[in-house]
Every structure is written in C-alpha cells, then in structure tokens.
C-alpha cells in the first residue's frame, strides 16, 4: 500500500523567506502527484499537478519538483507572505487505478 | 459555475441514526470521490466513481454506501452511524488525467 509522508508537520518562517516543503512516497509507480493548499475549516485548493513523466511545474511563486525514482517531491515557495499561511498537502495517484493517497500535511505559518 | 458543492455543511447524529451526504458538481466530470479527514490521519478515500452508474471501494469503505445515479451527483450514505464516523467529509471530482477539485466539506459529529 502506498504511504505518503510530509515533513515537517509544522513550519514557521518570517515573511519574505524562501521555503521548501517535502513529500515522500513509498511506491514509485505513480501516475501523478498533486499539491494542495487547505485553509482552516475549508476544502482543498489545487496548487500544482505534476504528471509522472514531468520533473517540475511552476505557478507564480510556487515550484513543485518530482523525482519519481527516489519517491520524493518538493514544493518551493518563493518570497513567502502571511497569506501563504495554510496547510499544504500532497497526494499521489497510483498508476494501477484511480485511487489517491494523501500525506498528513505541513502546517505553514508566515510571520509578518 | 459553482464547482463542487456539498450538502449539508454540518450535522450532528446520534449513534444508530442514518443520513445521506450529497455531492454535486457542474463541471461534467467523470470521476467523483468521497474522502474523510481525521486529525493526524490525512485524507482517506472511502468510495469513488469512474462514471454514472459506477462505484468502487476505496481505502476505508466499511460502514458507508454510495450511489451515482446521475453524473453530476455522488451520494454518501451512513446506514447506522457510529462515533468512529465523526469526521470531516470531502467530496472531489475530476476529468480523466486531470487535477481533483474539492468541495467545502461536511463536518459530521456522531454522539
């Protein structure tokens, strides 16, 4: 069974700092990997989707990379802002079906 | 275009009661999913559907049933609620090969 881990569980940084969130998965047979943002009491908002054949995706200040062979993905946030404070989750879709496996998330606080 | 909507937003049930959660999407998505989110556990897949009239079990299906009679709706039923089913329930949908879109969630408490 696929296991997805996100480290650290919580992170606090001063505004303006660049930061990296980590996601690791145990089975490299994935179809794609998706990064989400979740605000307290809200649903999940998709940030970036990386197909298994891709190495990275970029959207604004966000850059996600994927190393399928080593079972790792990183989400890079440049010039962090207080509005970036949220929980960030990664999810992998296995390539044998339609199931998605989520990590437990990293809770990010950006201090003004 | 409302995206993915969930009804109700909050619900309190007593042990043994039944209820149905409704998920609706207006994006003509084929795939729909029901997840539960518990502290420290992340999101876990309960059931999913790959198209109208189809359903399949996910990681934690016990105690739940689902139906997809119309393409735009995916219903999650609890026949006899238990305190272990206290959770936040999320519905999601997607097109083939595409990203998932999530609803706002339903917070369910079973006493």
Image: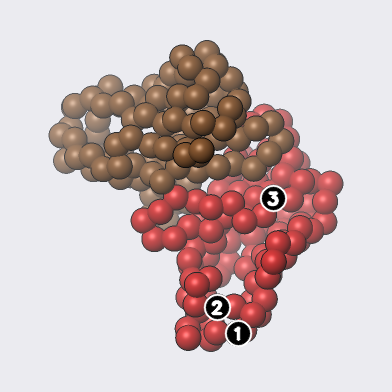
Q: Position of residue A19 (x, y in %)?
A: 64, 76
Chain ID of residue with mark 2? A
Q: CA distance from mark 3 to mark 1?
A: 25 Å
Q: Colour of chain B?
A: brown
The location of residue B92, given as percent across then percent down, is 51, 38
Confirm whether circles 3 and 1 share one chain. yes
Q: Colour of chain A?
A: red
Q: Is residue B30 left or right of residue B34?
A: right
What chain letter is assigned to the residue under label 3? Answer: A
Q: Which residue is mark 3?
A: A49
Placement of A34 over or under B14, stated as above or below: below
Whether residue A42 appears in this view of the structure is yes
Q: Are marks 3 and 2 in contact (CB under 8 Å)?
A: no
Whether residue B56 can be seen here: no
* Residue A81: numbered disc: 2
Residue bearing the label numbered 1: A16
Q: Residues within 10 Å of mark 3 (few under 14, many from 20)?
A: many
Disc 1 on helix, strand or loop?
loop
């Amino acid at each position: 069974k696929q296991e997805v881990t996100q480290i650290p569980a919580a992170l606090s940084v001063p505004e303006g700092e660049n930061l990296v969130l980590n996601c690791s998965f145990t089975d490299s047979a994935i179809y794609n990997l998706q990064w989400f943002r979740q605000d307290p009491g809200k649903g999940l908002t998709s940030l970036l989707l990386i197909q298994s054949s891709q190495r990275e995706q970029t959207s604004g200040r966000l850059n996600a990379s994927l190393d399928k062979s080593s079972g790792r993905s990183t989400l890079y946030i440049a010039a962090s802002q207080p509005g970036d404070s949220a929980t960030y989750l990664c999810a992998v879709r296995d390539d044998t079906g339609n199931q998605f496996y989520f990590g437990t998330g990293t809770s990010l606080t950006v201090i003004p | 275009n409302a995206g993915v909507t969930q009804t109700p937003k909050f619900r309190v049930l007593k042990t043994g009661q039944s209820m149905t959660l409704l998920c609706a999407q207006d994006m003509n998505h084929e795939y729909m999913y029901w997840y539960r989110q518990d502290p420290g556990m992340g999101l876990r897949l309960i059931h999913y559907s790959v198209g109208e009239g189809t359903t399949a079990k996910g990681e934690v299906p016990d105690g739940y049933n689902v139906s997809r009679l119309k393409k735009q709706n995916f219903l999650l039923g609890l026949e006899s609620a238990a305190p272990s089913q206290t959770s936040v329930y999320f519905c999601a949908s997607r097109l083939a090969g595409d990203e998932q879109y999530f609803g706002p969630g339903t917070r369910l408490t079973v006493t």
